[in-house]
Image (cartoon, rainbow, N blue to C red):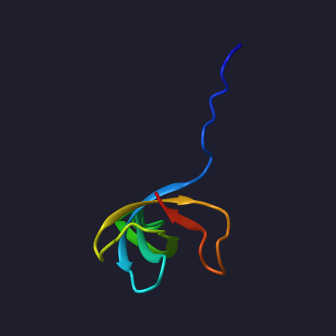
Amino acid sequence: MEQEVRVSKRKKHKGVVVSNKMQKTVVVKLERTLPHPKYGKVITRAKKIYAHNEDKPLQIGDVVEVVETRPLSKLKRWRVA
């Protein structure tokens, strides 16, 4: 019998911790670069997301990997991997 290999369909992103003031939650800034639609110059776009962080002590400026997960609260849809 062959073993089934599961491949995760969950999105993963790397970002920087910008806030750790909440209990079990960190705010992570995700940045992406893309060419400007008209002029072609490379520009940076950023988005802040809320990620669940159970017991890893994280400081502002730490680079973390976040994984998509089920809704944990009104704003939290990610967790720190």
**Looking at the figure, which quarter contains the N terminus?**
top right
Residue found at x 47% / y 69%: 53
The answer to whether 24 appears left or right of 18 in the picture is right
The answer to whether 19 appears left or right of 51 in the picture is left
Q: Identify which residue, 47 or 52, lies in the foreground.
A: 52
**48, above or below 22, in the image:** above
Q: Position of residue 80 (x, y in %)?
A: 46, 63
Residue found at x 46% / y 57%: 81
The answer to which quarter of the image holds residue 59 is bottom left
Residue found at x 28% / y 73%: 61
Q: Position of residue 21 (x, y in %)?
A: 40, 86
Residue found at x 47% / y 74%: 47
Q: Position of residue 40 (x, y in %)?
A: 39, 62
Q: For the view shown, which residue lies furthest in the bottom direction?
A: 21
Q: For the view shown, which residue lies furthest in the right direction?
A: 1
Q: For the view shown, which residue lies furthest in the top direction?
A: 1
Q: Identify which residue, 81 or 32, lies in the foreground.
A: 81
The answer to which quarter of the image holds residue 73 is bottom right
Q: Position of residue 69 (x, y in %)?
A: 62, 61
**34, above or below 20, in the image:** above
The answer to whether 43 appears left or right of 77 in the picture is left
Report how many numbered discs are placed on residues in the image: 0
The answer to whether 79 appears left or right of 43 in the picture is right
